[in-house]
Image (cartoon, rainbow, N blue to C red):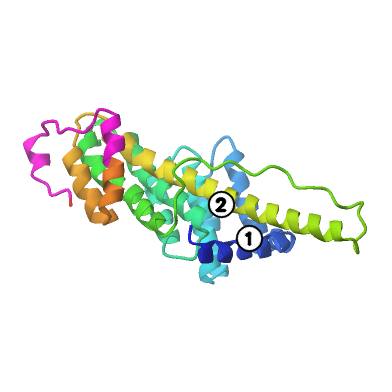
Amino acid sequence: MPRRLFLSLLSCSIIGAFSFLSYAQDALQQKLSELDKIRGKKNIPYDEVEKRGKELLAEYTAPEDQGRIYYELTQIHGQTGMVHADLVVQHAQKALTLAVDPFQRFRLYVYWGVSIFIGNIHKPREQQKPLYEVRRVAVRPYLEGLKEMQKYEIPEKLPDLPGGGVRYDDIKEDSPEYKQFKKMNEDHMAAWMEAQFDRKLWFSHQTLMNGVIDLYSRPPFAATELRQLATKILDDPEKVDALMKRIEAKGALKDDPIPEKANAKNPG
């Protein structure tokens, strides 16, 4: 990750840590927490979820607040079986146009992609579309999420968290050792936060990549179609090649015959 970007994010994280208690008491957060409790009910009252969501959107009109509300609505529908997959898509798309935490944004892309696939399964059998049609649409949110992640430096492997700091609470504050140990702990905290951020990036990237691979490592294989879509959306030959290597490792770097009607559609 670029150092300037990380320091900016680190600063925001530190400010966020100090303001956590006041944030937890913020009225909107309390209402979202109450709304989230609906997920624990045996029979989810989805109409009530939507009604309360609309009331919150009417009450809180700031873009960052609306982003939080749409994310919560996406989360509730996404974590309760995607019974209303169309609403997952709608809420996720709306949230992505607003101010939303970066890691929440990556999850929104995942919810969006999964809901398209699951939504097809929930339809009556006679209305379901074949996999090769559905995945052309479902793969796009994953690729859009990967595109958005290109602004960050993604670790090649999961970073380890640094070890613990040192105790200095029993050392006099005016001693050289106190200043030394304090500086060591501050450096350790900065390194820990950087590693934690990079770990979250790594997990988010893996989740989005796995969503693409899961769709295109199933027959009928369509490696050429995936390469065309990835090339258009990612606009980065190296990233496309890395993705196709993962497809190759799954034995899916090939093209199976697809019905002529479906094959005539332009995947791009």
Residue plotted at (67% across, 62% down): 14
Residue of label 1: 13
Q: Is residue 147 magenta?
A: no
Quadrant housing residue 151: bottom left
Instruction: Read off the magenta span.
Output: 244-267
Q: Nearer the viewer, residue 11 or 180?
A: 180
Residue 85 appearing in the image: yes
Quadrant housing residue 44: top right
Question: Is the residue 212 above or below the residue 70 in the image?
Answer: above
Count the marks.
Answer: 2
Q: Which residue lies furthest to the front in this view?
A: 176
User: Crowding at label 1, few (<14), some or many (≥20) Cα neighbours within 10 Å?
Assistant: some
Residue type, numbered disc 2: Phe
Quadrant housing residue 20: bottom right
Residue type, numbered disc 1: Ser
User: Crowding at label 2, few (<14), some or many (≥20) Cα neighbours within 10 Å?
Assistant: some
Q: In the visual, does 64 lie left or right of 181?
A: left
Residue of label 2: 197
Q: Classify mark 2: helix, strand or loop.
A: helix
Residue 62 position in % (x across, y down): 54, 72
Residue 11 position in % (x across, y down): 63, 65
Instruction: Tell me whether the residue at label 1 lies in contact with that at label 2, contact meaning CB atoms closer than 8 angstroms.
Output: yes
Q: Which of marks 1 and 2 is nearer the N terminus?
A: 1
Q: In the visual, does 163 lie left or right of 146?
A: right
Residue plotted at (35% across, 47% down): 142
